Image (tube, rainbow, N blue to C red):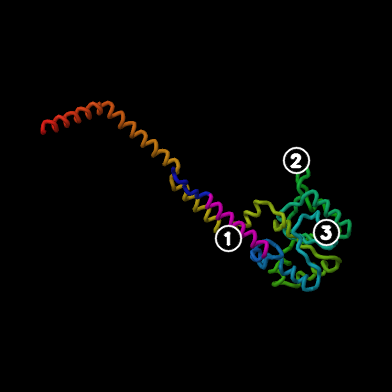
């Protein structure tokens, strides 16, 4: 009975699964890995981050919150000011309707973005809509193209440049919501974004190297199962070749003659 061979694939994927599990657990406990992000997130201490503005408003005793879910859920929250900075994810048609509701209830919005913001098409045969075109007549919307004045670097270099916008934020009642969801930093994120974020983390980087080394090992190592089958075939062919040779050379007859001659010689000695 042949002993079962060790399966390297199981061991490999077990290690990867444990690393992924560890990373997910760590990510739920801390947002420290986002402190060096180049995205304008309120977690980032980088010069492009928005943590400075978040802390300024918080220290001035403004109710400041991070919003990490789709905008339709805002309909159940207190009306206030929504701050969206350089969004990476387009708006959905349902989120567009939520903003209409938000403005109708007296909500305010500040968009820190020097480009347009797409609103996804509601049907297959339609094109994406323009956010600026859809809300250009909305008085409760403020679009700030020079978002850099409110980044960590801008607040440090030229704090006077942000005073007008901060006063505008305080002029509206209610909490301030910093949109993290459209920076791909929400509670519900696509698998592809999670993979990209994971690979940018040191643990993910190590995992990626392990995967690369493992596949290089597989490419450089011959298939053991195929080699074993080839060895069996070679052994069978060798045995068949020897049997054919012995049959052709009449080895049985030759062996009988040799044995008979040996026995006669023995009998003659006695």
- Say how many tags the image has: 3
Q: Give the quarter of the image for residue 86.
A: bottom right
Residue at image x 80%, y 61%? 82
Nearer mark to the viewer, of 1 and 2: 1
**Is disc 1 placed on a helix, strand or loop?**
helix
Crowd tier of the residue under label 1, counting other residues whose Cα lies within 10 Å: few below 14, some 14–19, many 20 or above? some
From which residue to which does the magenta span run? 10-30
Residue at image x 63%, y 57%? 197
Asked if the residues shown at circle 1 and circle 2 are in contact, with their CB atoms under 8 angstroms apart, the answer is: no
Using the image, tell me which numbered label, if any, was put on residue 141. 3
Residue 27 lies, in percent from the top left, at: 65, 61
Marks 1 and 2, how far apart in space?
40 Å
**Residue 248 within the segment the image draws in magenta:** no
Using the image, tell me which numbered label, if any, was put on residue 169. none
Marks 3 and 1, how far apart in space?
41 Å
In primary-sequence order, the first of circles 3 and 2 is 2
Residue at image x 70%, y 54%? 189
243 sits left or right of 182 in the view: left
Q: Give the quarter of the image for residue 101.
A: bottom right
- Residue annotated with mark 2: 124
- Work out whether 37 lies above or below 192: below
Nearer mark to the viewer, of 3 and 2: 2
Residue 201 lies, in percent from the top left, at: 60, 60
Residue at image x 75%, y 40%? 124
**Is disc 2 placed on a helix, strand or loop?**
loop
61 sits left or right of 157 in the view: right
Residue 137 lies, in percent from the top left, at: 85, 54
Asked if the residues shown at circle 3 and circle 1 are in contact, with their CB atoms under 8 angstroms apart, the answer is: no
Using the image, tell me which numbered label, if any, was put on residue 203. 1
């Amino acid at each position: 009975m042949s002993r079962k061979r060790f399966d390297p694939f199981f061991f490999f994927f077990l290690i990867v699964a444990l690393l992924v599990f560890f990373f997910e657990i760590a990510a739920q406990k801390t947002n420290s890995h986002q402190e060096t992000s180049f995205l304008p997130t309120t977690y980032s201490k980088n010069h492009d981050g928005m943590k400075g503005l978040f802390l300024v408003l918080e220290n001035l005793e403004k109710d400041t919150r991070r919003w990490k879910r789709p905008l339709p859920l805002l309909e159940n929250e207190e009306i206030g000011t929504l701050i969206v900075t350089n969004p990476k994810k387009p708006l959905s048609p349902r989120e567009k309707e939520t903003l209409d509701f938000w403005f109708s209830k007296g909500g305010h919005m500040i968009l820190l973005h020097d480009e347009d913001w797409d609103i996804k098409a509601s049907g297959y045969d339609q094109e994406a809509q323009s956010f600026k075109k859809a809300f250009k007549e909305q008085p409760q919307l403020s679009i700030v193209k020079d978002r850099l004045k409110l980044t960590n670097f801008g607040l440090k270099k030229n704090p006077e440049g942000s005073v007008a916008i901060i006063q505008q934020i305080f002029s509206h009642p209610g909490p301030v919501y910093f949109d993290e969801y459209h920076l791909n930093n929400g509670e519900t994120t696509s698998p592809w974004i999670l993979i990209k974020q994971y690979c940018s983390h040191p643990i993910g980087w190590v995992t990626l190297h392990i995967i690369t080394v493992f596949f290089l090992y597989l490419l450089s190592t011959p298939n053991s199962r195929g080699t074993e089958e080839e060895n069996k075939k070679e052994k069978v062919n060798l045995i068949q070749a020897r049997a054919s040779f012995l049959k052709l050379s009449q080895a049985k007859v030759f062996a009988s003659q040799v044995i008979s001659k040996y026995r006669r010689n023995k009998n003659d000695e006695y």
